[in-house]
Image: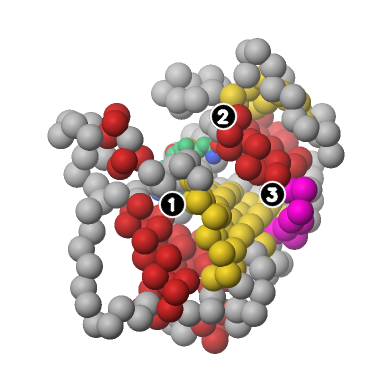
Amino acid sequence: MNRIEIGPGQEFSLGGENFVITVPIKERRLSTSDAFTIAKNEPYIRVYEELASAFSPRSILELGIFQGGSYVFLDKLFKPRRISAVEISPKPVTPLLRYVADKEGRFVHFSTSQSDRKILEHIVPNELADELDLVVDDASHTYEQTKASFEILFPLLKPGGIYAIEDWSWAHSPNYQAPDAPFSKRHALSNLLFEQLMLMGSTFLISEIRVWKFLYLIHKANTALPAPDEGRNESGSIFEQILNRGREWSLI
Ligand SMILES: C[S@@+](CC[C@H](N)C(=O)[O-])C[C@H]1O[C@@H](n2cnc3c(N)ncnc32)[C@H](O)[C@@H]1O
């Protein structure tokens, strides 16, 4: 595939669809029938572009739709058989609804939290044919909800699959240091990355974690056993498998 050309107005085209990059999302441009708004700037686009050159997910689940640009981008870039996404906002994005309406295997859920176990456990077998190969979490960026999604979805990810978590490093940015900064009362999302590193060290579930300043990719081992054998049950968490010599750690 040719390299995506991003124009001076932060616009690009892919697979017959037009996109406009809008970051930060507060300066919100709504998606229109001419172009979808995507809240990923060039470094993110390049990571996914490189990934798509060597990885062909059968089914994708996106957490955090915003204006739908990233949904259409992932669809055009990876060309999966199926793709679904959840978004907590109740406001549907009309151009995205139009996009999915005439296509097979394309689903969207508004008014839906990324940590809604019941819906996620419905989506994976029913909409994604139990072929979940790629999760992209660009939703709340909170430690608790991002972890909850991972606890639900990582066991459902196929061996060899990839779990992407965006914007993990916000707590380490100068803009988030003041007592009245956004998220100042929240735990850092980087706590979760540390826990996932410990999980990688403790088990054979994760073969690699590739970290950039703005996102990371967790590769599920090709040899990971199917979900029921991963030690997960309704009440348990995958993180219970961390071996830590009985020592405690505290969240920052
Ligand atoms: C950074 S934006 C997503 C941008 C989009 N993925 C893109 O790249 O164009 C984050 C989105 O996640 C949604 N969100 C926040 N908390 C959420 C939650 N708990 N569950 C699902 N979506 C959530 C927000 O409403 C917002 O639309």
The single residue placed furthest to the top in the displayed view is 8
Tell me which amino acid carries mark 3.
Leu
Q: Residue at x 47, y 71 (%)?
A: 200
* Residue 101, numbered circle: none
> In the rendered image, which residue does mark 2 sit on?
41
The secondary element bearing badge 3 is classed as: helix
> In the rendered image, which residue does mark 1 sit on?
113
Q: Is residue 35 left or right of residue 66?
A: right
**Looking at mark 1, is its residue's CB closer than 8 Å to ligand 1?**
yes
The secondary element bearing badge 1 is classed as: loop
Whichever of labels 3 and 1 marks the residue nearer the N terminus, that label is: 3
Q: Residue at x 48, y 79 (%)?
A: 203
Residue 105 appears anywhere in the view: no
Query: Where in the figure is residue 148, as x and y percent of width and height?
Result: 40, 62
Q: Residue 3: name its quadrant.
A: top right
Q: Residue 77: name its quadrant.
A: top right
Q: Which residues are magenta?
A: 52-59
Q: Residue 57: name its quadrant.
A: bottom right
The secondary element bearing badge 2 is classed as: loop
Q: What color scheme is it?
A: secondary structure
Query: Where in the figure is residue 86, as x and y percent of width and height?
Result: 53, 49
**How far, Cα to Cα, is label 3 from label 1?**
27 Å
**Looking at mark 3, is its residue's CB closer than 8 Å to ligand 1?**
no
Circle 3 packing at 10 Å, graded few (<14), some (14-19), many (20+), is: some
The single residue placed furthest to the left in the displayed view is 179
* Residue 51, numbered circle: 3
**How far, Cα to Cα, is label 1 from label 2?**
24 Å
Query: Where in the figure is residue 244, as x and y percent of width and height?
Result: 30, 78
Q: Is residue 163 above or below residue 3?
A: below
Q: Is residue 64 above or below residue 247?
A: above
Find out whether the residues at labels 2 and 3 contact each other: C-beta distance under 8 Å.
no
